[in-house]
Amino acid sequence: MPVRTLLIADTLNNAVSAKSFELAGVADSLSPGRPDHAAYILAGDDITGAGQDLAEKTAISAIAFEGKMFRLPDPEALATAICAMPELATARYICFLHTPAGCHAAAKVAAHIDAACISGVANIGFDDDQPVLERSLLNGKVSMKTRPQTEQVVITTMPGAFATPEIADQHARPRVECRTVTVALADSRFHPETVSKAEETDTGLDRASIIVAAGRGIGDEENLALIHSLARTLPNAAVAASRPLCDLKWLSYAHQVGATGKTVSPKLYIACGISGAQQHLQGMQDSQCIVAVNTDPNAAIFSIADYCIVDDLVRFIPEIITAYEALNPDLS
Amino acid sequence: MKILVCVKQIIEPVGPITIREDGKWLNQDDALDYRINYYDTYAMEAAVRIKETFSDTLVDAVSVGPADIEPTLRHALALGADNAIHIKTREKDYLPADITGRLIADYVSVNPCDLILAGVMSEDTMQSLTGPVAAAHCGIPCATAATAITVDPVKKTADVVCELEGGINEQIRLGLPALITVQSGINQPRYASLSNRLRAKSQLIEVIDKSDDAAMPGQYQKIRRVFVPEKTAHGEFLEGSSTEKARVLVSRLHERSIL
């Protein structure tokens, strides 16, 4: 049986990202109960060991692309290597994770085989044996089901949307194959040089049991004082922000929660003036209790909140502080 | 140096969204507003800053869509684009990046440029694909989610810092021509100057007509259904005055031993 589904794992420094294991769930949606219909692809300069581990944990065979050009993430070289592999001709689905680099490589592979490229897929169904892919629009306010019009399809899948399935056959011995890749780089005009971690300033977000988060909806920079004041009132609380607020430089990126920032799961997350962009939700949806305060009753954040307050922050935040202090009179 | 900036007019919901009778798109009513994509304003600003450093730079803005996207191209002119190009489609509904990316690549094949900039994604359809699809079809390298761009027009290179996940950055050198998708926060987009706004009002926009189906790339996907997802909200909407809501909230959290 030729491989039907190619799953492209996300790797950095020869380690596979945790989200890459979710691709096994994508394969299971495409061919339920048939991990042997899928194969992982992973790239690095010393990646076979990581491939072995990935294969054992998912019961899906793995093809490890090894080469110097994969020392640093290189979506261009990865796509070129995928385009050159014989398995691509018979693969029906080529699946990447929905990250900028995943979308980049996906688009390049799709262009090569002239296939539909559908990103941010959150659910996969079938209708007359044809795949129907579901993705979200307008920050989750609308969903669409779309049917690819090409035989082969390249997709990127939303993190968190597909759970890694249990391994049904404990005796499965998935194959791991190492392929040395020497993509012709002479004419490449894409040269990764270094990878570095952004400077960390301690925001206390990792330790906080309560997080008060501010979004663009707080309106004015001076209203940040209210956010800080609430965080100071509540025990073991820290201040977080959505990306647009950091873009305005009202708070540093160290405070950013979401896809490109921190992932947090405090006891209580109070989202103030945050609309609920998916990129933000990815970073905080596992919080134990979510309170959302927003003037827009249709804000997407309300779909995941435990307590929803449609109100103006400038009015409401001082009221929470008062109510909390009334509950704990010795604090005020 | 010639820079092309891809801009998109996005849908901004300002009221409850309803679905068109055929179930294939949204009702284009008062619930929807339209404006330039947030991420594209950073791409425009990045282009204008390159032009300020290298004065013989030309910045063109291109957008794909039906007749009513003109205000977004005028906005791009006001932000500092020298010329605006409208690749006009008939489609008023969902335009997948498979199509927009190919149309932009077709344009570039007859109007070459040194650098193409685009927002990392659009706020409404969030595909993150238009830039990469265009680059792939142009056969040029692509860097995504850039948080810093330094161009050297003599060496024909661009040094780009790309944002990976989890606070990791990758430094990449691109040979030009190349395409870069721009992450928000790379700069602080300026307000349009009065002189640019006046110029933008009357400047001629070049229109490339693709409103005939035969002029469009093939169809890569077909919408089956668009719907407002059922509210999975298990949440409680608190009622009353601000004071009442705050009291109820604090006591609920107290009952659950959260506060």
Image (cartoon, rainbow, N blue to C red):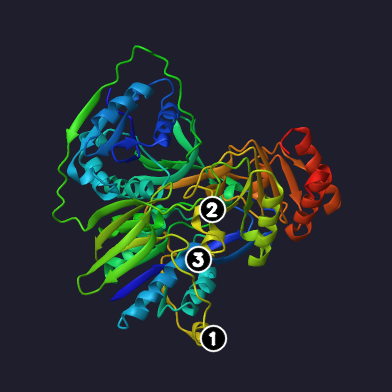
Identified by mark 1, the residue type is: Leu
Q: Position of residue A245 (x, y in %)?
A: 57, 60
Q: Secondary structure at mark 1?
A: helix
From the viewer's perspective, tell me whether residue B243 is left or right of residue A114.
Answer: right
What amino acid is found at the position of numbered circle 3 in the picture?
Pro
Q: Which residue is mark 1?
A: B194
Which residue lies at the image location 45% right of the left edge and 68% below the top edge? Answer: B187
Q: Quadrant of residue A164?
A: top left
Residue at the disc numbered 2 = A255
As measured in the structure, the alpha-carbon distance from the residue carrying label 1 to the one carrying label 2 is 35 Å
The subunit letter for the residue under badge 3 reads: B
* Location of mark 3 (residue): B66
Mark number displayed over residue B30? none
Mark 3 neighbour density, 10 Å: few (under 14) some (14–19) many (20 or more): some
Looking at the picture, how far across and down is residue B221, in whole percent?
44, 46
**Residue B34, position as x, y percentages in the image:** 59, 65
Mark 2 Cα-neighbour bin, 10 Å: few <14, some 14–19, many ≥20: many
Asked if both marks, 2 and 3, belong to the same chain, the answer given is no
Q: Residue furthest front?
A: A330
Tell if the residue under mark 1 belongs to the same chain as the one under mark 2.
Answer: no
